Amino acid sequence: MRKLIGKQEMFAIGARAVIQNDQGKVLFVQRSDNHLWVMPAGSIELGESIYDCVVREVKEETGLDVESAYPISLYSAPKYSFVTSYGDPYQMFSLVFIVDKWSGELFSQTDETIAAQFFDIDNLPENIPHHYHETLDDVKQFNGRLILK
């Protein structure tokens, strides 16, 4: 797509996973390209549903298998415009899921990540993008109705 449109801003449609362990700590992975700590997330691919997207991204970035997840918020407003580590501008259209059942072994490294760790919500690493703090606020405020932003 980028070959066709160059540096023109486009929508990036994807999913993000909030995964908490039994102690309530939240899983973050450290990206290999920019070293930021993020929640498992990524863009939807042709031929898959948004749920399939979150399942695939979690598996690729953590090694974990999503067994059950439900959506809590949708981020699509123009204020969620960013630039990739490659300099490509985009407006995020991301559905956030809480993964309430998962299995498998957590990988410390994958093709896309250099670390994975559960963090206490009140003691997160410094290099987390702002909208991930907003996502954690949404998790705390979620009342069963989809949050639209």
Image (cartoon, rainbow, N blue to C red):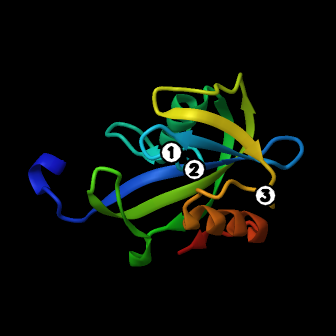
| In front of the other: 20 or 32 | 32
Q: What element carries label 1?
A: loop
Residue 62 percent across, percent down from the top left: 60, 31
As shown in the figure, which amino acid type bears the numbered disc 2?
Val
Structural distance between the alpha carbons of marks 2 and 1: 9 Å
The residue to which callout 3 is attached is 121
Against 83, residue 23 (above or below) is: above
Against 149, residue 101 (above or below) is: above
Q: Look at 79% across and 57% down and name the residue there.
A: 123
As shown in the figure, which amino acid type bears the numbered disc 3?
Ile
Q: Look at 61% across and 26% down and name the residue there.
A: 63
Q: How many numbered circles are shown? A: 3
| In front of the other: 14 or 134 | 134
Mark 2 nearby-residue class (10 Å; few <14, some 14–19, many ≥20): many
Against 42, residue 139 (above or below) is: below
The residue to which callout 2 is attached is 38
Structural distance between the alpha carbons of marks 2 and 3: 13 Å
Q: In this view, does 116 lie to the left or right of 55?
A: right
Residue 15 percent across, percent down from the top left: 50, 50
N-terminal label among 2 and 3 = 2
Residue 31 percent across, percent down from the top left: 50, 41
As shown in the figure, which amino acid type bears the numbered disc 1?
His
Q: Is label 2 or label 1 in front? A: 1
Q: Is mark 2 on a helix, strand or loop?
A: strand
Q: What element carries label 3?
A: loop
The residue to which callout 1 is attached is 35
